Amino acid sequence: MTAERPAERPDTRPAAGPAGADRAFWDGDFTLRTDGDDRPAAPALDPLGPSGSTVRGRDLADLLAPAYRRFTGTG
């Protein structure tokens, strides 16, 4: 007669936390820009590219870009 092994329980421990820059953020290891830093912020729209969503045949990013630029003062 063989002894039955109890069914293995799934590992319910949380996965390892964020790594790299995310880990540094959650550990409080980051620096905010100083008050005297006058470098302009990078335009957020430029690296994004097309959204893939269209409105009446035009890309949504193209339609919203003029309003975004007015709000941010970048154009």
Image (cartoon, rainbow, N blue to C red):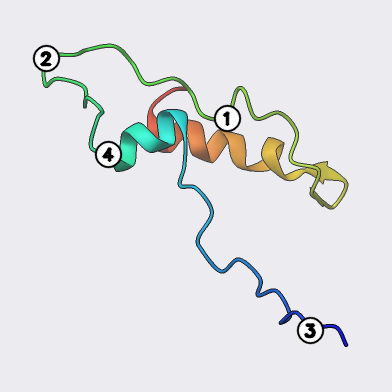
Mark 3 is on which residue type? Ala
Q: Vertically, is 2 above or below 60?
A: below
Badge nearest the viewer, 4 or 1: 4
Rounded to the nearest whole Å, what is the CA distance between mark 3 and mark 4?
48 Å
Q: Name the residue: 50% across, 37% down.
A: 68
Badge nearest the viewer, 3 or 4: 3
Rounded to the nearest whole Å, what is the CA distance between mark 4 and mark 1?
29 Å
Secondary structure of the residue carrying tag 3 is: loop
Tag shown at residue 27: 4
Sequence order check, earlier mark of 3 and 4 = 3
The residue nearer to you, when weighing 59 against 15, is 15
Q: Is residue 4 left or right of residue 75?
A: right
Mark 2 is on which residue type? Gly
Q: Vertically, is 22 above or below 31?
A: below
Q: Vertically, is 23 above or below 8?
A: above
Give the quadrant of residue 71: top left
Q: Which residue is mark 2?
A: 36
Mark 1 is on which residue type? Leu
Badge nearest the viewer, 1 or 3: 3
Q: Is residue 50 left or right of residue 33?
A: right
Q: Which residue is mark 1?
A: 45
Give the quadrant of residue 15: bottom right
- CB under 8 Å between discs 3 and 2: no
- CB under 8 Å between discs 4 and 1: no
